[in-house]
Image (tube, coloured by chain):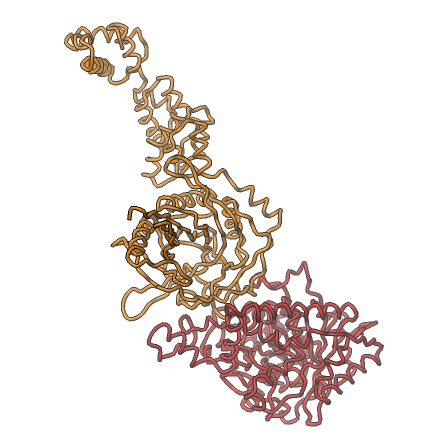
Chain colours: A red, B orange
Amino acid sequence: MADLTAMELRDRIAAGQTSSVEATRAILERIERLNPAVGAYLSVFPEQALEAAQAVDRRIAAGERVGPLAGVPVAIKDVLCTTFGTTTCGSRILQSFQAPYNATVVRKLLEADAVIVGKTNMDEFAMGSSTENSGLGRTVNPWDPTRVPGGSSGGSAAAVAADLCYAALGSDTGGSIRQPASFCGVVGLKPTYGRVSRYGLVAYGSSLDQVGPVAHTVADAALLLQVIAGHDPADSTSIDEQVAPVSDYLAGFDEAVTGLRIGIASAYNAGADPAVHAAVSRAVEGYRGAGAEIVAVDMPHLDYAIAAYYVIATAEASSNLARYDGVHYGYRSPNAQDYIEVYTKSREEAFGKEVKRRIMLGTYALSSGYYDAYYLKALKVRNLIRGDFVRAFERCDCLMMPVAPTTAFPIGEKTDDPLKMYLADIYTVGINLAGIPGISVPCGFDEAGLPIGLQIVGPAFSEAKLLRIARMHEARTDWHRRRPGNLR
Amino acid sequence: MSDLSYKVIVGLEIHVQLCTRTKMFCGCALRFGTEANSRVCPVCLGLPGALPVMNRQAVEHAILAAMALDCTVAEFTKWDRKSYYYPDLPKNYQISQYDLPLGSHGHIEIPLEDGTTRSIRIRRVHLEEDAGKNVHAAGNFSQVDLNRAGTPLLEIVTEPDLSSPEQVRALAVELQRIVRYLGVSEADMQKGHMRFEPNVNLVIDRAAQQFKTPIAEVKNLNSFRALERSVAYEIRRQLDDFLETGRTMQMGNKSTRGWNDVDEVTVLQREKEEAHDYRYFPDPDLVPVVTTPQWIDEIRARLCELPVRRQVRYVQQYGLSAYDAGVLTADRSTADFFEQAVGAGGDPKRVCNLLTQVGLKLAKDRGRDLPGLGLEPGAVAALAAMIDRGAVSASAGNTILQAMVETGKKPEVLAQELNLIQKSDAGELEGLVDQVLAENAAAVAGVKEGGKKSQKARAFLVGQVMQKTKGQANPKVVSEILNSKLGGS
């Protein structure tokens, strides 16, 4: 049963063919058995999940109306505030932090009658591309336990890939949904900035962060997006629905987009490993075979995306993370002698290396005398990159490219070389800088049997079309049906 | 010493708490003096994941104040984060406005002691959130109360145009009057609604050479008295320091000082201006503010005549003294009431006297504003008219006004009930005058003697008539009859 899609499970529960309790029990059993090896979850809520499942089953039995995720066990990244359990962000500084409120997306999941089974591991404060920066646990790639699951939403991607939930929420600041989805052979969608509320998403880079779904299929991703999308008065940066209405992401979902024009930046795509490049090219050929037109596009400023991203994201992070000071909540050093030491020792003892590195980078970039040279310049580059995409989308409906230059790399391979790690974000950060949506769908495996993802990128608020385009690929292939063999 | 002269240079930074319903970026109510940390939420506590949402009313209040201060209102402005670590600042950054303040290049007209006014330039007006409060009650720890955190604050910065402690005070008082007039702040000093930070230095001319003393900024003053005295103290201190050490202004030798209210001295806090790097950058959680012409027009419609203008007009139009005009215009509701009574036909001076001598006192005793007494402006105008035509005396008028407040009755009714109608009937009074003259031969003789003694004797005779009528005779009519009988005046 664990290999059903979320939508299939929901429909079976609704039809009385199975129950949410049965599905939830099966998932909890798998978590108990497999999570010690996979490390996808930081916390699991068996009792609460079963209670929620029972409630849904009762309501369905009573003929009551239930939500679009009724009874489906889902996971959420531990960067989303919940009134239940802790909200740790994978950091020792928030290891015992209990939020007094639910993030808007969590509230929406609960209102949709989803069963939240647990919170997933992540790079500390979503800073990383391998989940190795978690201060609270190690997650491995379900396809090869010696390899990373990607990051920062590595726990969510691994949980979906290992069938430890039917779908999950992640967050994506520079690729943190798409890249682990690609590494774990699942679907990951980063929506347009402003499509989904950030209220209750613990901030890393506020102008880049976006919550999105991780799922087995494009349809499941659409289903989750439908639940979490929409304006939130509590988030000033969430878009007014009169400006950009939330569409029905599943309406006409299976209809191929006719006259599809796909933009390819060849030189840019060629930077990936041969296996990745080949798999992406094959996927694009599949579209061409189905009648799509391939358009060559030029993205002259994308080369500067990594540099701009690591200035803007770290600058915002240096300010966003200033609040973890040991004064009001979270870890407080027992060694502090005065209030200055409450700050310095609490932060020194509880933040991990990568978080400290990014806080220092960002603080430097915002410092008087450097602001113009770094932060302001990065904002200008960001505008140029946005312009590249706008121009490209005048000539095509979407762009296709790899998600990451490689497949999942061995654990420990890049931990000593942060720059190398940063460069692995080459295909994803530009999309965050431009604020546009991108989706990662499975498109093959390398010789080592590791999954490869195809990234499809569309203009702002084009999620409905993007999902349909992704579905065209999925409908022709069965990569998304494969499961890691060692975790049955 | 004799060839030394100096000019005082003061610029003022003022923080004014706006009287909005809720805080600047969250829905917590603004209330004073509730239990510590009882008016807080995830946003003003700076909890992980919480996001600010701009309070539109606060922005409108700020724009209205900027307009009243004759500022250019920004068409496009934004919110910036100002980073510094302090326990009362939950996010360790304050949401403020850096390079694009809501208002800039304004003026404020302040009244001078000689009855004229002076225009002081306003550099900028911007909106920001307040911090909480650290409480060092006892023991080896401090506590933080975040009720105040997130309260909307208007920061107003003047150019260094002020040149005396009196002017500094006048500006502060005038600003209080303006924000109260506009209804954007209660500006209650006791509740810390206004806080001042003067920047003071001197330009000294000595032996055909000019010297500037180092600037001192006095932090966090919360009364007009402390503001005025701290500036006066700084002037003396800086002059003494210059004479003693010859120290002059240099890059980075601006100092920060605190005010000791008991000893009435400023105390050095930071000698060298620390290179404070606040690392300002635009807050990515908030969207920029675009002030559309339509919105600006809506706000402009709420502007009113400013108190200083009104004060000058009262002197010119109604012939009131500058003092009385100041008292009447100190508060918008008082001035509005005054003008309604004058509009209903009351003589401005009579109405002014009734309001300043009785009305405001009664209002103060009852802890209300003038309209809160429930008086009809028309009834006050009617009372003023009664005094004017001699139906009641001025002092009886005051008694009647008080009774009007107490009973809600009309002045005509009260004058009858309290027996305060003046006897102005010359025929009736003449008999009484004759009687008094007959009974006081010595005084009559005194009048005829002339000189000082004559004045005294006349007053005595008038007093006797008043006594016989239990104060109800119109003293003016009595005097006239006396004069006609005894000759002279």
Residue found at the very far front of the displayed protein: B207
Quarter in which the C terminus of chain B is drawn? top left
**Which quarter of the picture shows residue A175?**
bottom right
Is any part of residue A29 visible from this angle?
no
User: Where B432 sits versus B397, above or below?
Assistant: above
Asked if B247 appears above or below A379 in the picture, the reply is: above
Q: Nearer the viewer, residue B328 or A231?
A: B328
Left or right: where B50 falls relative to A480: left
Does residue B477 appear to the left or right of B315 in the view shown?
Answer: left
* Residue A209, horizontal then vertical, whole percent: 59, 72
Nearer-the-camera pick, A119 or B102: B102
In the rendered view, does A355 fall on the left or right side of B272? right
Residue drawn 50% across and 50% down?
Answer: B62
Instruction: Answer above or below: position of A88 versus A462.
Output: below
Total marks shown come to 0
Q: Measured from the top left, where is residue A396 in percent x and y?
A: 78, 71
Q: Is B377 or B296 nearer to us in this picture?
A: B296
Percent across and percent down for residue A136 are: 49, 84
Pinpoint residue B218: horizontal percent, then vertical percent: 36, 56
Q: Residue at x 55, y 81 (%)?
A: A122
Q: Residue furthest left?
A: B442
Q: Can you see residue A455?
A: yes
Q: Quadrant of residue A150?
A: bottom right
